[in-house]
Image (cartoon, rainbow, N blue to C red):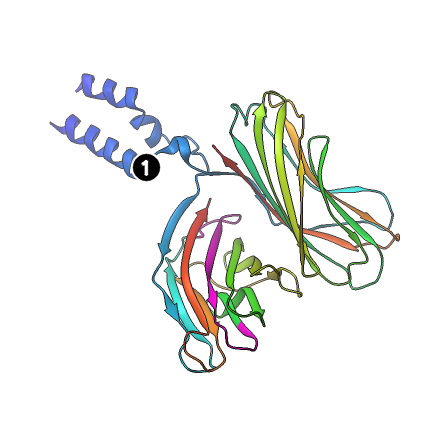
């Protein structure tokens, strides 16, 4: 048994158990590359979603970074994509451009047990939103699961907005 | 046998908490959502600072990614925001009559020598993106202060608001 304990010490296992502060390693919670497009409708449509487990943001300062991207069609008119936390928009882009890619990112930081601060940025094609980056203050309980989603709004032609991929990282 | 079970459990738990290759894991060095604003003056004012410990960039190729953001007051006063890495101005994020807007900047600073770095910084404001390449000469063996400053063109309190920052270490 002594030998085994010495081995454990040498490998750092006991140090781990003694709660030595760990580096703030960023980890990927999920990633997705399953394509999804808006239907032949003008209604907002969820193109991808992920259920962030309850208490994933278990202390103030802990954050989630969501990155999502896709394309918009050749249909003329303003098409849109959003990242939402439950029903709160944390990054948004509407564009009148045609046949270009879109990219959205949001960093959402816990500021209290039921308060978050979101900051979103966006690009489509070669431009950014004229409204500027998105600052938001979602009032969402971190003690329950939070639905993170990408919502697209088209112009009535199928695949006006296409989701191509996303990543969700947790930033301790 | 109990000892063997204990050790196995400890090692399994440890391995289970480790990323696949921690040497290549991106880490958060600091983050902040503490709001800070300019005062009723036209002095360049630190709105956020972070002292990166000495030897954080311990080898060539290591880098930090800095993201900062904030907003401006609803008036036509000229406002200026700058992002620094040590004594090096990475970029003037904007210097304009920004009226009730949000602003954002990201920089990646990569060590190319013990006292040499290469950096690219881009920012978004007013529906435009702009970027700058710089070549800081900060000594990585000493702490390096990363900071955001605000400077009012007119002495009106709260014209520039810092709202958040994240600094990541890219090994």
Residue at numbered disc 1: B20
x and y percentages locating residue B52 in the rendered image: 60, 31
What are the residue bounds of the magenta stretch?
Answer: A57-79
Q: Residue at x 79, y 49 (%)?
A: B80
Determine which quarter of the picture holds residue A27.
Answer: top left
Q: Residue at x 47, y 55 (%)?
A: A67
Identify which residue, B110 or A61, lies in the foreground: B110
Is B81 above or below relative to A77?
A: above
Identify which residue, A123 or A15, lies in the foreground: A123
- What crowding class fits label 1: few (fewer than 14 Cα within 10 Å), some (14-19), or many (20 or more)? few
Q: Residue at x 42, y 57 (%)?
A: A166
Q: Is residue B123 magenta?
A: no
Q: Is residue A61 magenta?
A: yes
Whether residue A147 can be seen here: no
x and y percentages locating residue B47 in the rendered image: 72, 44
Tell me: A134 left or right of B77: left
Identify which residue, A85 or B84, lies in the foreground: B84
| Chain bearing mark 1 | B
Whether residue B23 can be seen here: yes
Q: Secondary structure at mark 1?
A: loop
Tell me: B59 left or right of B131: left
x and y percentages locating residue B124 in the rendered image: 66, 54
Identify which residue, B148 or B132, lies in the foreground: B132
Is A27 above or below relative to B59?
A: below
Determine which quarter of the picture holds residue A143.
Answer: bottom left
Tell me: B160 left or right of A66: right
x and y percentages locating residue A63 in the rendered image: 49, 50
Q: Residue at x 47, y 65 (%)?
A: A71
Is B110 above or below relative to A93?
A: above
């Amino acid at each position: 048994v002594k030998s085994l304990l010495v081995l454990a010490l040498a490998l750092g296992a006991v140090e781990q158990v003694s709660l030595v502060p760990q580096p703030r390693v960023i980890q990927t919670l999920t990633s997705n590359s399953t394509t999804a497009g808006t239907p032949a409708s003008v209604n907002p449509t969820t193109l991808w979603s992920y259920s962030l487990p309850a208490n994933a943001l278990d202390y103030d300062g802990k954050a989630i970074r969501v990155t999502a991207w896709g394309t918009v069609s050749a249909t003329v008119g303003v098409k849109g994509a959003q990242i939402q936390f439950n029903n709160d928009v944390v990054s948004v882009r509407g564009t009148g451009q045609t046949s270009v890619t879109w990219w959205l990112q949001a960093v959402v930081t816990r500021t209290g047990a039921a308060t978050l601060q979101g900051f979103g940025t966006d690009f489509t094609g070669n431009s950014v939103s004229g409204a500027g980056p998105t600052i938001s203050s979602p009032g969402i309980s971190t003690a329950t699961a939070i639905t993170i989603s990408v919502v697209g709004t088209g112009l009535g032609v199928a695949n006006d907005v296409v989701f191509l991929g996303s990543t969700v990282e947790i930033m301790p | 046998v109990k000892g063997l079970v204990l050790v196995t459990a400890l090692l399994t738990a440890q391995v289970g908490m480790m990323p696949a290759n921690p040497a290549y894991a991106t880490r958060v060095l600091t983050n902040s959502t503490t709001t800070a604003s300019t005062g009723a003056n036209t002095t360049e004012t630190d709105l956020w600072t972070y002292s990166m410990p000495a030897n954080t960039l311990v080898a060539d190729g290591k880098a930090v990614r800095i993201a900062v953001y904030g907003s401006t007051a609803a008036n036509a006063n000229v406002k200026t925001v700058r992002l620094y890495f040590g004594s090096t101005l990475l970029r003037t994020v904007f210097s304009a009559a920004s009226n009730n807007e949000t602003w954002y900047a990201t920089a990646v600073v990569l060590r190319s020598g013990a006292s040499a770095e290469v950096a690219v910084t881009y920012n978004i404001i007013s529906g435009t993106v702009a970027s700058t390449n710089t070549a800081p000469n900060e000594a990585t063996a000493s702490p390096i202060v990363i900071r955001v400053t605000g400077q009012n063109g007119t002495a009106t309190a709260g014209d520039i608001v810092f709202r958040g920052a994240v600094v990541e270490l890219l090994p």
